[in-house]
Image (cartoon, rainbow, N blue to C red):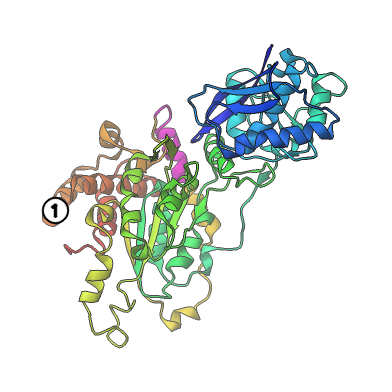
Amino acid sequence: MVSVAYTVAFEGVDARMVEVQCAVSPGLPAFSIVGLPDKAVSEARDRVRSALSAMSIALPSKRITVNLSPADLPKEGSHFDLPIALALLAALDVLPDDKVAETVALGELSLDGSLVPVIGALPAAMAAAEESRTLLCPVACGAEAAWVDAATVIGAASLGEAARHYTGQTTLLPAEPGEVTSGPTGRDLSDVKGQERAKRALEIAAAGRHHMLMIGTPGSGKSMLAARLPGILPPLTATEALETSMIHSLAGLLDEGGISRQRPFREPHHTASMAAIVGGGRGAKPGEISLAHNGVLFMDEFPEFPRTVLETLRQPIETGEVMVARANAHIKYPCRFMLVAAANPCKCGYLSDPARACARVPQCGEDYLGRISGPLMDRFDLRVDVPPVAFADLDLPDPSESSAQVAGRVMAARDVQSARFEGHAARVNADLEGGALEEAAAPDTEGKDLLLKIAERFGLSARGYHRVLRVARTIADLDGSADVRRPHVAEAVGYRLALSSEV
């Protein structure tokens, strides 16, 4: 007799259904797991054997074979322990096989039979809901998985508790969703003295999700400005929160099942590898660009990142997704993020200060910023010079505008965009392309004449031309204007040509 249980295997943020088949047959005593299991899955037989022993269940002196179907799909992770144990108990007639087959199970077993939390409960719940099955998981994962409204989620503390549920001795109650967590507060835009142009660019970037590059001397406030960006971004919508949380679930970053409505803010160090930034490594895990999905990727000391890492950002910036290709798998992750980069003007950092600049000026600056290729630089919608703050400005009273006030304007602009893009794939102005861009961001006659002159004079690329239109549309939204006018185009062009070698 062959008993069946169900679980999932993860391919990026997608969870594929896996049928766990167990057969107990005459022959030499053995316990084998087939179906492309990795080391963690193969070791499940020892954990399952010990967990059953803790329940006073001895395995028969027969041949036990567990097949993970489809057999050509790689199986990775310790979450296969629980479904293997359930299928085996059903094959031994300890549990009713029809009840076991009605659920999707995942969880790691301790040697004493208790269930250990595993990653991926949220996408597993999505897959269970699509199959109209109940999800059984460790009790610590229940709050995370219960965020899927269409799924019935039950959590068990141990294998024995799950067994008693299947035999009707006890009933496991449905899990409740975890708390909606809020991000850290205290970093307010009013803390920044001066830098009015940079703060204005930050507001535009937040309103339209535009990529932004800040260049300035050390200590001018670039990192300080970027750290206050989360305070002016609108909260995640319900759809965005679920998308982001599914990625964070696979990375094991959800805290006690709580889903955050604050947009992710990732700031990797410049020594991070390509696999850490883009994704990959063992199991092709999501990288920083995917963990920043629907949020911000802040890359300080931008030219110090390896050239190969920087160049890999070009395609994800355009497409909003990344394909992690490995010998045995091709995994696709979403990565629609806002890139905010900061850099010094040169290696010594004081290119514009004759008193402190090195002897290699201006070659020092050209070599340093030359590490950022032209195609990558072309993808920044906003380029901002962040000059040093005068000591006299540090004694000025706090600015009147706080992060809450700026966030109000950003939210109003995002609401306008949400209404504009209702029923479309685009969510913000940065997503506009093709006919939708021409319809939504077409400037008036004066604005179009100005943009054509600028494009001809400074040789804007087609990408640069379209990015100016998107930024101008965002500026018009912040201004409450239905039309894109000449002042909006002029401001967008000013940010586009800042720091440009053509100027």
Most common SS among magenta residues? helix
Which one is nearer the viewer's eye here, 169 or 200? Answer: 169
Q: In which quarter of the image is residue 306?
A: bottom left
- Residue matched to label 1: 459
Q: Callout 1: 10 Å neighbours few (<14), some, many (20+)? A: few
Q: Quadrant of the N terminus?
A: top right
Q: Which residue lies furthest to the right in this view?
A: 169
Q: State left or right for residue 388 relative to residue 36.
A: left
Locate residue 444, reporting x and y percent. 23, 42
Stretch of the chain drawn in magenta: 412-424
Q: Quadrant of residue 86?
A: top right
Q: State left or right for residue 51 relative to residue 204.
A: right
Which one is nearer the viewer's eye here, 87 or 239? Answer: 87
Instruction: Identify whether 346 is placed above or below 281.
Output: below
- Queried whether the magenta region covers residue 419, the answer comes back as yes
Q: In which quarter of the image is the C terminus?
A: bottom left
Q: Residue furthest left?
A: 456
Q: Residue furthest bottom?
A: 355
Locate residue 421, reporting x and y percent. 40, 33
**From this viewpoint, is residue 136 visible?**
no
- Hey, what amino acid is under mark 1? Gly
**From this viewpoint, is residue 492 visible?**
yes
Look at 75% across and 36% down and name the residue there. Answer: 139
